[in-house]
Amino acid sequence: SPVIDRFDLFTIVFNIIISIIGGIVVNRLIPMLKEKFIKAQLWGYDLNKRNSKEIKVAESQGVIVAGIFLVLMFIMIAIVFSEHLHPESDFPNHKFVEYLAALLSICCMVLLGFADDVIDIRWNVKLWLPMIASLPLLLVYFANYHSTTIILPKPVRPYFGQQWNLGILYYVYMSMVAIFCTHAINILAGVNGLEVGQSVIIAGSVLIFNLIELQGICAEEHLFSLYFMIPLIACSIPLLIRNWCPAEVFVGDTYCYFAGMTFAVIGILGHFSKTMLLFFIPQIINFLLSVPQLFKFIPCPRHRLPKLDPALNKLNPSDVEFKKKDLKPLGWLMLRFFSLTKFIRYREYQNNDNETMINTTNFTIINSVLCWFGPLHEEKLSRILMLIQLVFGSLLTFFVRYYLVRFFYDS
Ligand code: UD1
Ligand code: MG
């Protein structure tokens, strides 16, 4: 039957209880361990503070969150499957494999993130690793569901038919989701509280979505997702508090990859990857805006985070300079497009050698917000970005999913 039974309710309550305990443990561990991280050279300067070069801030605290999260999930698996442990019961191997594959993929990304924090892996190498890490997941998807058919929206059905079988393309799409989710959070970063703040908002939205859908026909998938989201939120909140402006610790790439992959895994195995992507609308816009710099059409500095004006103690957009003659036609087109749409600001000038130079703000929505409303204090900027996440990520998604959708699909 589609509705959840009493044992499921028990598992949810159990999950909430161990998640709260997990959150308390993370809250204790961070202050205990941060000095050890600094000793191990895992630290960074908080670049947008007036006294930035005086204080070492511990990096990679996300590994603590991820560690406790994994512990909770292993306990959770034992509880969820305890129902089937007596000899007469049919052990649901297919479901068990789903949990293991999900955790394997998440584990791999925690490892990659930590390695990235320690040795800075090259961008063009680390870009593809989530795809490989998601392979076990895709295999499980293949074995358990096999369905690669999408239902087309009503308005286009007269031209393209009721449904399409995407076949192998569907698997390509799912590995793209894995790549996108793992990196999207990491490139929308550089302001205190932003990485973990956006993750908590996304996780909270997924949680609400799961609770609504628990009454529907896909209750089992949404229950599965709940088991992951509750501990993710509970373990992330203590980190958010300590990472909020002024940051006591940094989350590191470990946290970004860990949270991102968790969302990807849940979206794929929960069969709501499209809704999941809607929760990522700000990240999608930030990614599209970043494409010119990520793929080197326009030079990309090591850091694109905003620049502090020490006199005002407020942030301005950071910028990058290059010779106009080095710009390829496509790069020029991108520069013009994002300048016309007001996402960036650029100017041309002559340098001492009489060459035409271009100075442009960096291509992230963080800098765009500063172009529109700046200069802003770091905490204010962080709050605005949280608001954007809430409105354009979460509220918009619920509007599309529960209101607009009726014009495109039946029921
Ligand atoms: C990504 C971004 C980069 C951004 C950086 C900031 C891309 C392609 N890369 O790089 O533009 O500058 O994140 O996290 O978009 N830091 C702060 N304040 C913060 C957060 C970070 O000063 O609130 C600084 C600290 O020095 C910290 C360092 O950024 O040590 C962490 O950077 P890291 O996560 O290694 O950068 P990337 O993820 O490679
Ligand atoms: Mg990072």
Image (spheres, helix red, strand yellow):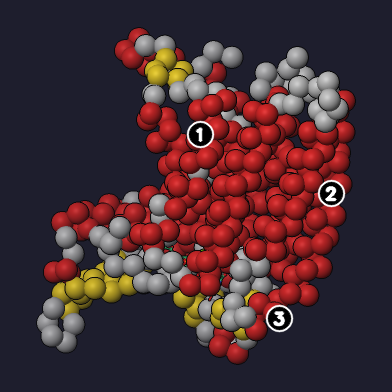
Q: Amino acid at mark 2?
A: Ile
**Residue visible at 57% across and 36% down?**
267
Q: Is residue 74 visible?
A: yes
Q: Say which label, 2 or 1, has the lower sequence index.
A: 2
Do callouts 2 and 3 mark residues in contact (Cβ within 8 Å)? Answer: no
Q: Is residue 138 left or right of residue 243?
A: left
Label 2: how many Cα within 10 Å (few below 14, some 14–19, many 20+):
some
**214 or 168: nearer the viewer:** 168
Instruction: Provide the secondary structure element on which disc 2 rests.
Output: helix
The residue that disc 1 covers is 139
Check mark 2 vs ligand 2: CB closer than 8 Å? yes or no: no
For marks 2 and 3 on the same chain, the one whose residue lies earlier in the sequence? 2
* Residue 112: % across, % down: 52, 60
The front one of 177 and 338 is: 177
Rendered image: mark on residue 35: 3
Mark 1 vs 3, N-terminal side? 3
